[in-house]
């Protein structure tokens, strides 16, 4: 008799802001992956999916294969079918879920986290992240335990025939112009887009130099990719290239570098894209959705352009939820998650690369000129490891330190202190007119967080 109850790891709530995530083998175990697969079939079956079908993909972490085996075994034994996509970016699985008419998509990835971690994230049939209430049902089933499922026919498994080719054609169709004559360096983070990202840009006519595109299961995100955009920036300068693109391990984000080696972040991409879409009448409602982490320079640039800025909590799922509520066409995060709602249901780094590079090509300008749509205020981020990230809101000492920084900055900057949604960290972010001033206030508040919560 199988029961779910013994599968819960000692990690608090199972589903976080981006699915189930933890250290592979200790927090995210084979049994837990198996149980998630079984529970998902039962829950989706309750909600009218009948015999549900799941598109399953993964990034190249060494734990991905055995987690994939366990997850798909759980799905099939509960009576669900599996369309196995293999190693694919997260946004490709979201696309395939809709394109292939599946009940759900499942990605085995920990995105930008180190190789020791892994995660399991579910998409709904519409390609968006599974609603909270369905995640809650899956978690409740695992927490409460349950008897073996009644006798039934096991599910089937089949490959995602032409799934990648259809995804590539979809991305190519979103380009504003071809990239002929453009030389691009793409940092694949030794992740899921290591083959696909260079292939896509070459197909659009660019000369492509791929770096960190040889995944071995343990080198994903290791000193490269979107967490280290300075790597691609240096390579752009060394090669005399026109542009650089940095993806993370599952390629749902993209950061850029211009020909001079300046890093271009998600706020700058969002600002340039919003202004371009407004000019062509495609910015629905003349608004853009960002998060509370958006640079002050972004907010002021949008005000000057007559574009409303709506801010959410950090996390692309919150951006998308607000976009859906507002009917917005564009949203994103400074970290490089950008959602072009006309073309995608989630942040897609490959799509972002196509859109931003092809916008420069259509206008006949360099990437740096596009990025100049906003002035980026110096921003300093300090990540403080803590024992309990949930204790932040109750800390009077931290509140006093934040208040002192706010008073000193006035309207010349801002401070944001928040708990990470995926790691035991408190993030202290300060923007100011100078980097020295931002650093001084960030360090002062981080010292208090470290003393009280560390």
Image (cartoon, rainbow, N blue to C red):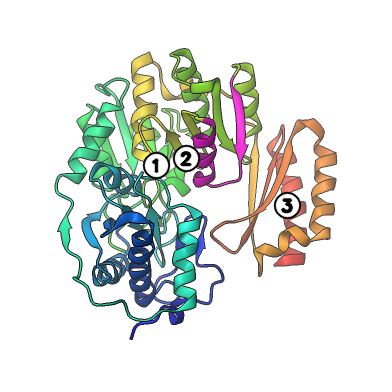
At x 30% / y 25%, what residue is drawn? 175
From the viewer's perspective, tell me whether residue 206 is left or right of residue 373. Answer: left
Q: Regarding mark 1 in the picture, which secondary structure is present there?
A: strand
Q: Callout 2: helix, strand or loop?
A: loop
> Which image quadrant: the N terminus?
bottom left
Q: Determine which quarter of the picture holds residue 26.
A: bottom left
Q: Nearer the viewer, residue 263 or 19?
A: 19
Identify the residue at image location x=28%, y=58%: 50
Say whether residue 431 is magenta: no
Residue drawn at point x = 33 percent, y = 61 percent: 45
Question: Picture quarter containing residue 357?
Answer: top left
| Location of residue 65 in the rendering, given as x and y in whole percent from the top left corner | 26, 67
Task: Give the residue at mark 3.
Answer: 443
Residue at image coords 36%, 59%: 44
- Residue 353 percent across, percent down from the top left: 36, 33
Q: Is residue 327 visible?
A: yes
Using the image, determine if residue 327 lies above or below residue 90. Answer: above
Q: Are marks 1 and 2 in contact (CB under 8 Å)?
A: yes
Q: Which residue is mark 2?
A: 336
- Position of 188 relative to 170 (above/below): below
Residue with the mark numbered 1: 246
Kindly state the secondary structure of the residue where label 3 is placed: helix
Q: Which residues are magenta?
A: 307-326
The residue carrying pointer 3 sits among few (fewer than 14), some (14 to 19) or many (20 or more) residues within 10 Å by Cα, namely: some
């Amino acid at each position: 008799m199988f029961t779910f109850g013994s599968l819960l790891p000692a990690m608090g709530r199972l589903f976080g802001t981006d699915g189930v995530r933890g250290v592979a083998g200790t927090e995210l175990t084979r049994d837990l992956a198996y149980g998630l697969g079984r529970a998902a079939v039962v829950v989706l079956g309750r909600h009218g999916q009948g015999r549900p079908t799941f598109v399953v993909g993964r990034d190249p972490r060494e734990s991905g294969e055995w987690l994939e085996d366990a997850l798909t075994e759980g799905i099939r034994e509960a009576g669900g079918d599996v369309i196995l996509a293999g190693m694919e970016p997260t946004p490709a699985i979201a696309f395939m879920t809709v394109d292939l008419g599946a009940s759900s998509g499942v990605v085995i990835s920990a995105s930008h986290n180190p190789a020791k971690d892994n995660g399991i994230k579910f998409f709904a049939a519409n390609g968006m992240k599974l609603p909270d209430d369905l995640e809650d049902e899956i978690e409740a089933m695992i927490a409460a335990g349950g008897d073996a499922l009644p006798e039934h026919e096991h599910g089937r498994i089949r490959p995602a025939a032409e799934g990648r080719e259809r995804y590539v054609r979809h991305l190519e169709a979103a380009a504003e112009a071809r990239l002929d004559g453009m030389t691009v360096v793409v940092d694949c983070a030794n992740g899921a887009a290591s083959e696909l990202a260079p292939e896509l840009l070459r197909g659009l006519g660019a000369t492509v130099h791929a770096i960190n595109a040889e995944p071995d299961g343990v080198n994903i995100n290791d000193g490269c990719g979107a967490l280290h955009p300075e790597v691609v920036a240096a390579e752009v300068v060394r090669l005399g290239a026109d542009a650089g693109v940095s993806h993370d391990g599952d390629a749902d984000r993209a950061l850029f570098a211009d020909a001079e080696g300046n890093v271009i972040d998600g706020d700058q991409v969002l600002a340039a894209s919003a202004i371009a879409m407004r000019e062509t009448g495609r910015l629905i409602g003349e608004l853009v959705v960002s998060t509370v982490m958006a640079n002050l320079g972004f907010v002021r640039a949008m005000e000057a352009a007559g574009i409303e800025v709506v801010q959410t909590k950090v996390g692309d799922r919150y951006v998308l939820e607000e976009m859906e509520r507002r009917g917005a066409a564009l949203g994103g995060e400074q970290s490089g998650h950008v959602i072009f709602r006309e073309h995608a249901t989630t942040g897609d780094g490959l799509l972002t690369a196509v859109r931003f590079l092809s916008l420069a090509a259509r206008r006949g300008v360099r990437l740096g000129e596009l990025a100049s749509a906003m002035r980026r205020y110096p921003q300093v981020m300090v990540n403080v490891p803590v024992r309990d990230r949930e204790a932040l809101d109750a800390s009077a000492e931290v509140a006093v330190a934040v208040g002192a920084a706010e008073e000193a900055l006035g309207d010349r900057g801002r401070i944001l202190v928040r708990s990470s949604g995926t790691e035991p960290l408190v993030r202290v972010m300060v923007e100011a007119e100078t980097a020295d001033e931002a650093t001084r206030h960030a360090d002062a508040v981080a010292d208090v967080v470290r003393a009280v919560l560390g």
